[in-house]
Amino acid sequence: MNKTDSSRALQTRILHPEGEITPGFESFAAPVTRASTVVFPDLATLRALDWRDDAQWRYGLHATPTSAMLAGRLAAIEGGEHVLLQPSGLSAISNVYFGLVKAGDDVLIPDNAYSPNREHGDWLARDFGVTARYYDPLIGAGIASLIQPNTRLIWIEAPGSVTMEVPDVRAITAAARARNVVTAIDNTYSAGLAFKPFEHGVDISVQALTKYQSGGSDVLMGATITRERDVYLKLKQARMRLGIGVSADDCSLVLRALPSMKARFEAHDRSALALASWLKTRGEIAAMLHPAFEDCPGHAEFKRDFTGAGGLFSVVFQERYSPEQIDTFCESLELFALGWSWGGAHSLVMPYHIDSMRTASRWPHRGTLVRFYVGLEDEADLRADIEQALAKLA
Ligand SMILES: *Cc1c(COP(=O)(O)O)cnc(C)c1O
């Protein structure tokens, strides 16, 4: 029941209503706490604010109860403690760079990295006085020989989300720890479900929540997760300086999809594995790149460290097919759409020319690579769709 002070004008009463919140109401839905301004009970509280204290509310840009609720759930999934949310996976990557790296520092990036991460490293190298060097993702303990006194950050992708090699994360993090270098993994592939980075010595886990966490191909968000408070505070400060924030509405959409994420991930995993097993036997295919298969580079590490794979895999077509023929194959698919990103319900496909994306390792295949993201459509229909598109190659 509204008790409004009737001595005030209607316009004021609309802005300052009283008694609106109904006590005793509970639901499963995350409340959406939109805010720019956060109001304080008195100036002493406001003046005592400490940006390091996550229990304090300061300004809607930094955190709201909805974003904090999402952060807490992501920490639980990943096995981390400190979470920051960014408006995209790529902005989570850039938050790591700006939090840890300054002019004169050196960064190591795996050759199988998400391309915009490479481009970010190249940009810092060109314009910000940083060196960005690339390494063979299968280098393992050999990474030690690349670490310099000014190396500040080593990126890891396990597996690379296009070429699917699984690095030896433990060997890389052990070498980094021995030299006091921070490691950051782009853990989007596993959604934090199938690979637990902090159990393998990683300092920072990056998630593109745009993918499985959102699950609907309709939200962009990212997260950085860590157990280490000093690393967290560096990222938190950079996030504040850069003016990075997320909307409570977007957070609530991700919170809505999180309860079904594990079930979705497992369904994608089953369908992808079944389709990949069948596709591997086709004569058009020269190589199947799915880490659950023995001949995929890094399969031993995958078996040791991962509990699942999700909906992604790539194939390399036989060399006899021209890039144009492979384009025709991709465009002939009816259920696999052409488009970036993944993690939603719909199947996707994309051809890649890997040679032009590598600088530190030799890509062993000559045919065109096609990456599939297997959605939640009926598996037999997806297989029939691939079959009819393969027929166009004949
Ligand atoms: C999609 C993706 C990102 C970036 O996420 P956005 O939210 O699209 O910016 C980063 N890393 C990997 C591996 C991705 O697949």
Image: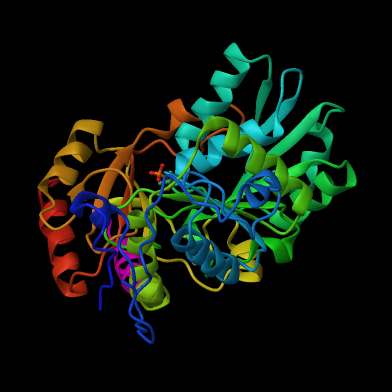
- Classify residue 279 by image quadrant: bottom left
Please identify the quarter of the rendering in which residue 88 is found.
top left
> Of all residues shown, which one is farthest toward the front?
7
Q: Is residue 57 visible?
A: yes
How many marks do you count on the picture? 0
> In the displayed structure, does residue 168 sit left or right of residue 257?
right
Q: Is residue 170 left or right of residue 159?
A: right
From this view, report whether residue 291 is shown above or below residue 206.
Answer: below
Q: Eyeballing the image, is 202 above or below 278? A: above
Who's the residue at 19% across and 37% down the image?
327
Residue 269: percent from the left, percent from the top? 39, 71
Please say whether residue 112 is visible from this viewpoint. no
Residue 87 horizontal/vertical position (percent): 42, 44
- Magenta span dominant secondary structure: helix
Judge from the rendering whether residue 180 lies leftward or rightward of residue 162; answer left or right.
right
User: In the rendered image of this protein, does residue 290 appear above or below residue 101?
Assistant: below
Which residue is at the front of the view, 69 or 86? 69
Q: Position of residue 42 (x, y in %)?
A: 60, 52
Q: How is the image coloured?
A: rainbow
Residue at the outermost bottom position: 24
In screen coordinates, is 286 left or right of 126? Answer: left
Residue visible at 18% across and 74% down in the picture: 378
Q: What residue is shown at x 21% (from left), y 73% (from top)? A: 379
Quarter of image, ligand 1: top left
Residue 301 in magenta stretch? no
The answer to which of 384 and 81 lies nearer the viewer is: 81
Specify the quadrant of the image occupied by residue 360: top right
- Stretch of the chain drawn in magenta: 269-283
**As displayed, is residue 48 above or below residue 265?**
above
Residue 61 in the image: state x and y as whole percent: 48, 43
Asked whether residue 275 is drawn in magenta, I would say yes
